[in-house]
Amino acid sequence: MEAMNLNRLAYFVAVVDAGSFTRAAERLGITKTVVSQQVARLEADLRTSLLLRTTRRVEPTEAGRLLHARSVIILREAEDAFGEIAEVTASPIGTLRIAAPNDFGTSTVAPLVAEFCRTYPACTVDLVLSDAKVDLITHHIDVSIRVGWLDDSSQQARRIGAFRQFLVAAPDFARTLSVDSPEDLDQQPFIANGALREPLVWHFSRTDFDRRTVRMRSAMTINTTPAVLAATLAGGGLSVLPDYLIAEPLQRGTLVRILPDWSLPSGGIHAVYPAARFRPPKVTAFVAMLEAKVKRPPIKREG
């Protein structure tokens, strides 16, 4: 077998990720014929079939899946090698791929991406918003922003900030309530966030020795946090929402806090990285900007 051509690996990975030669060619900015020829030559070099071609989609064979997994790592290492050389200039450049959850991504990351692109015009950004965990290697993500509590200590992650959670309601709805303590909440209409592990169980504390756990009564369950906010603003019931999402409604008075003397658990904001020794300047610059932003308290006054 002649010397391996890394471009062929890149074409092959693009076809597997895209599920077709046509979409892979569009992503790579070359013709479909070139992609098809290079993948065919790769199969000839390896003397095995790597892809199963159907009229609708291209799927990897068992050998193709093995090669894809290894190729993603090889290409990532090659990209890091080029990045290490480029680091000498210490200037962010290239495409920055970011993953973030829908609510935090929309309220905080997306506006910051606009600022980042203005600050570093040599960079472009590909922002992926999803409440599901995005595989960093498969999707070529440079940094994933995760909000809450990390459940995998093996990840390369750094805590860059924190957020608070508040029990809130629309003002008109709040005026109908007679709530003096957390125990009074279990019969009130509650808008549950279906994206959470335990959307109805909440732990309140007032001091280290005064803690209460309440199971709420669900009036409705919604599976995205922005939609929970919309229903709460519309007067659908009580809900627990993060400070970064409700800072403006609290300041405008379209939401008010319920039981403000009681606290709910705070969570972390983390930057999670793929396994690599090197952090390109574009990554470190963006994370530094995000860290500076999230360390500024989003709630300027109590609602």
Image: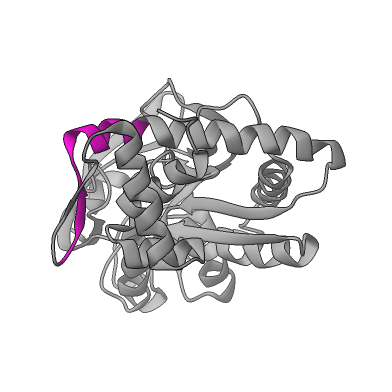
Measuring 18% from the left and 40% from the top, which residue is drawn there? 61
Residue 230, quarter of the rendered image:
bottom left
Magenta run includes residue 197:
no
Give the residue drawn at x 73%, y 46%: 285
Q: Quadrant of the N terminus?
A: top left
Residue 213: image location, x then y, percent: 27, 36
Q: Quadrant of the C terminus?
A: bottom right
Q: Is residue 150 visible?
A: no
Q: Is residue 213 visible?
A: yes
Question: Residue 121, how many percent across, how many down?
Answer: 77, 64
Name the residue located 45 percent from the left edge and 26 percent from the top edge: 155
> Observer-nearest residue: 143 or 17?
17
Picture coordinates of residue 151, whole percent (x, y): 36, 28
Q: Is residue 86 above or below residue 110?
A: above
Residue 286 location, x and y as percent? 68, 49
Q: Between 54 and 43, which is closer to the camera in this rendering?
A: 43
Q: Please give left or right for residue 112 compared with residue 153 in the image.
A: right
**Front-most of residues 153 and 197:** 153
Q: Which residues are magenta?
A: 56-69
